[in-house]
Image: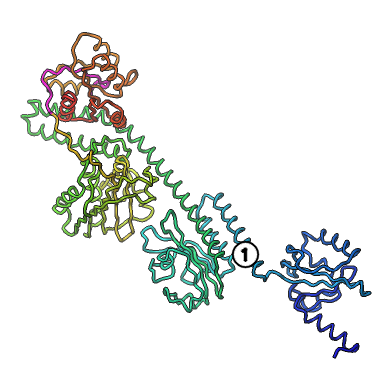
Amino acid sequence: MITPANEPTLYTSLFAAYPDALLLVDDAGLIRLSNPAADTLLGYAPGELIGRSVDTLVPDSIRPRHANFRHAYAHQPRPRPMGMQMDLVAKRRDGSEVMVEIALSPLQGHGLPYVVAAIRGIGDYPRVRQALARARYSESVARIGRLAVDTRDPQVLLQRIPAEAAEALGVDTAVLFLLEPHGLEFVVAAGVGLLPGEGVGTRVPNDPRGTPGFVLAHGAPVVVPDYRLEHRFGVPAGYLDAGLVSALAVPLTDRGRDVGLLTVRACRPQAFGDDEVRFLESLSNLLAATLQRVQTEETLRHAQRLESVGQLTGGIAHDFNNLLTVIQGNLQVLEELPAVAGDDHARLLVAAAGRASRRGADLTGKLLAFSRRQVLSPTAVDVQAMVQSLADMLRRTLDQRIRLQVHTADAVLPCLADPGQLESTLLNIAINARDAMPSGGALSFRVSRCDRLPPALCEPFEIAEGDTGGFVSIAIADTGAGMSDAVKERAFEPFFTTKEAGRGTGLGLSTVYGFVKQSRGAVALDSVPGQGTTVTLYLPCATTAEEEDTPGRPDTVPPGLRVLLVEDEPEVRAVAVRFLTGFGCHITPCATAEQALLRLDSPEPFDLLLSDIALGAGLRGTDLAREAQARRPHLDVLLVSGFSAELIDMSETAPASWELLAKPYSRQELQHAIARAVSPH
């Protein structure tokens, strides 16, 4: 029963037991009483608030505004219930802030100069907690987004993302796993709170029975409520020893390809909901986009380097081909001289020089193959038959300790490629594989149909991802020494080789690169140190029209053929005159296009214009050919060049009746080209 005697005790008990924080504040703004709930909410010891100004509890940024409000309220005190505002903040003793609702109850009407302030912390409200978490996640994603735009070094982002994830989610550890290119292992790329034995650089098998492997195999975010009850995959003992309980992991993908995962782990049960999953996915997407941008920029820089080297090698090859034309031509003339033909020693010397010049021509061809400046004659190629034939030859010539296998799928269409260059390319790769297996091993060829290229190959090889024409895939795999990442990075560069001096030119894979790119295909290189290398060529499928055989054409030069020869290099011109004389032709040699046009103005008859394309200053051979045919429509045309880029351009723009020939050419090659040029079209 309440009596006047026990009323003060009752009110004191009510004040102390009230669940909301209560402060009794006088008209000077000093705190006269505080209940335990106020001490707890605001972080003070019992009784420590008494005597302090209420302004102590107001954040510095809004203290002037609060002082004005308190003075205005003192002149017109009125009850103000909770829930009127949602943006109030109180400052705790340690300087942190807590979101609150405040109700004011003036006691002046009861003759007391006080105001009771009831304060309720609302940070624990579910809807407020969720709003605060979302704001925290959004701010974190924005910071990482700005960093992704500003930084050019992906390592900065790799290091920052786990730290950002751990801080925003309030977890104990965060780890970023990246999948190795061969797909067999993960490597710990970065992390915070890493466990013993889980340092940066640690490799983890990509096994779906393990934690990272399960996430990638699952292909979606994975939530672990309690590691102790987990049965979907094996939990490492180190996780339980470290006291880890709950976790969330999301896969990291780049254009549909798995590249790793980001995982966070906590030592307490933690409910990871949709907001947390979306937050972690946002961080993963930002990282994937940055890695993709870096890879694209590096691919572009690499392509630019290769293009620059290609232009340089193309120019060198042009001059070298003119020299080789003179050397080879004179050697062929020497070979037929009676003094040489009757001297065995002289014939051996000429033959050795001829072989050396042909090796020089082969080297030039490799340079042009890399620079994509070789002249190709693409036709429909039965790849299965070619690979089987090549395998039969390799079985007889390779080390018997190398096991050779061929796997071909059914109904593989012919590919469109230059058959000679394709066979040379396959042989080149096979020889590299042999050299990588000095103690023996396995070499396999696998031919199959590929409807679309892997997205990572489309951009560097300038092929549309939607290309539906289809490709023939030729994979050549060995079990040799393999390549490190540093070697793979430079494998297609010309003159780069890991072989000892004298064992290679470094043009092997660079010519493969040039050949497939010029053939409108692509090449992929996959290699693991100690496990071998796989080189996969992707060549476009041939259409039905391209599979039709081209009818044969004559290979003899008509006797008495009247040839207008135009060549600005005197020694090359002399070689051509000797060859043409041997064919029984009547030759009119000219050094410039202008001299040739004067001859065409004369009544002198001509059957064939044989001209170099590059003629120094003045008209080019192509301009001369057009003008010559305008004056003499029945004149046949054969154009030659040591700069095969010119021939490639001409093969796409010249009339079909014009014949093209690359330098250096042999007597027989010139004979066949002339025969094709003057045959009925």
Which is more toward the observer, 184 or 436?
Answer: 184
- The single residue placed furthest to the left in the displayed view is 342
Packing grade of label 1 (10 A; few <14, some 14-19, many >=20) is some
Total numbered badges shown on the rendered structure: 1
Residue 663, placed above or below residue 175: above
Q: According to the image, label 1 marks what residue?
A: 133
Q: Is residue 241 visible?
A: yes
- The single residue placed furthest to the right in the displayed view is 111
- The single residue placed furthest to the front in the displayed view is 1
| Quadrant hosting residue 338 | top left
Percent x, y of residue 544: 23, 41
| Quadrant hosting residue 305 | top left
Percent x, y of residue 367: 30, 38
Identify the magenta region: 554-573
Percent x, y of residue 394: 17, 52
Q: Which residue is drawn at the image coordinates 89% and 71% (left, top)?
A: 26
Q: Say whether residue 352 is left or right of residue 124.
A: left
- The single residue placed furthest to the top in the displayed view is 603
Percent x, y of residue 410: 21, 54
Which is more toward the observer, 644 or 485?
Answer: 644
Q: Secondary structure at mark 1?
A: helix
In the rendered image, the quadrant that contains the N terminus is bottom right
Q: Which residue is drawn at the image coordinates 66% and 66% (left, top)?
A: 128
Residue 288, placed above or below residue 372: below
Residue 561, placed above or below residue 232: above
In the rendered image, the quadrant that contains the C terminus is top left
Q: Is residue 319 visible?
A: no
| Quadrant hosting residue 340 | top left
Residue 92, placed above or below residue 336: below
**Amino acid beneath label 1:** Ala
